[in-house]
Amino acid sequence: HNFYQSSLAADKSLKVLNYIDEFKLKIRSEGCSVIKSNIASSVAYLYDVVFRPYS
């Protein structure tokens, strides 16, 4: 059970890291105007992934 919890946590943090990398690439390629429109949804997504209790 503990192992499952920790591997689930590792999986989630890996997803977050991948998402952040993708976001950085988007920032480089698309520029500032897109970031402003996307930042709220990105923050909401990250919050959902990281802080939602494990189901």
Image (cartoon, rainbow, N blue to C red):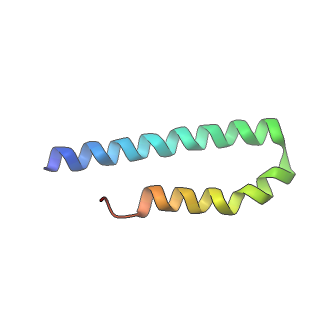
Image height of 50 relative to 25, above or below:
below
- Residue 3 located left or right of residue 21: left
- The image quadrant of residue 44 is bottom right
Which residue appears at 32% of the width and 48% of the height? 9
- Residue 35 located left or right of residue 6: right
Residue 28, given in percent of the width and then of the height, sits at: 78, 37
Quadrant showing the C terminus: bottom left
Residue 34, given in percent of the width and then of the height, sits at: 81, 51
Q: How many labels sit on residues? A: 0
Image height of 4 relative to 38, above or below:
above
Residue 52, given in percent of the width and then of the height, sits at: 40, 64
Which residue appears at 70% of the width and 58% of the height? 39
- Residue 22 located left or right of residue 18: right
Of residues 53 and 20, the one nearer the viewer is 53
Residue 45, given in percent of the width and then of the height, sits at: 56, 57
Q: Going by the picture, which residue comes out furthest to the left?
A: 1
Q: Going by the picture, which residue comes out furthest to the front?
A: 55
Which residue appears at 86% of the width and 53% of the height? 33
